[in-house]
Amino acid sequence: MATPHKEFDAQQKAWYEAACARIDAARLQQLNMQLVDIHSPTGAERQASEFMADYMSRMGLKASYQPVNPITGNAWGRLAGDGSGPALMLYAPIDTHIEAIPEHDIPWVGPELRADMLPKAEARGEPLLNVVRPPRSAVAERHAS
């Protein structure tokens, strides 16, 4: 069942536009490409998660790598507000899904590993467009109690 689409009201649209105006597309593209270049098949995301925890920490967030086992774990970061509004959690898997090893991935991915299936970033055109990694993310909101 699809989630119905709801238009932003005027205040939400203003918030969205203000947030978009603060995005440095070139910096975000560079980060995305650095992350894509870290081989992180499902179940072996440790290096990518450690990279993100370090990046968030350098950006001023309270961040940490949370190991699940010796080869995988989670990165989390928190940017605290003043406590007067809802908390927002952003969730984005960072695994590349496949191992990029033909003997392990074929025939599951098809007859061959295409260039867009390999853990190597490639920028074409405008920033954030055509960066090799499928966008996957989810957003959750929890109201402060």
Image (cartoon, rainbow, N blue to C red):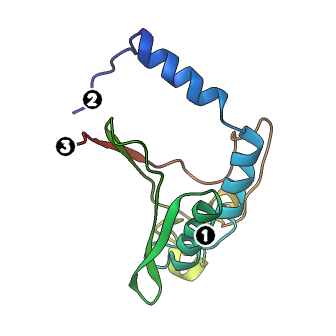
Up the image or down, 3 lies above or below 11; here it is: below
- Where is residue 4, by image quadrant? top left
Q: Nearer the viewer, residue 104 or 133?
A: 133
- In the image, which is nearer the foreground, mark 2 or mark 3? 3
State which quarter of the image contains the C terminus: top left
Q: Nearer the viewer, residue 61 or 120?
A: 61
Callout 3: SS: loop
Callout 2: SS: loop
- Do the CB atoms of the residues marked 2 and 3 lie less than 8 Å apart? no
Q: Nearer the viewer, residue 109 or 35?
A: 35
Q: Residues within 10 Å of mark 1 (few under 14, many from 20)?
A: some
Q: Which residue is mark 2?
A: 3
Left or right: 20, with 71 as reference point: right
Give the alpha-carbon distance from disc 2 to disc 3, as whole Å: 26 Å
Residue occupying image coordinates x 47% and y 86%: 71
Up the image or down, 125 lies above or below 112; here it is: above
Where is residue 69 drawn, in percent x and y?
39, 87
Q: Residue extending furthest bottom?
A: 70
Q: Which residue is mark 1?
A: 54
Residue occupying image coordinates x 43% and y 14%: 11
Where is residue 124 drawn, in percent x and y?
79, 43
State which quarter of the image contains the N terminus: top left
Q: Which residue is mark 3?
A: 145
Residue occupying image coordinates x 25% and y 42%: 144
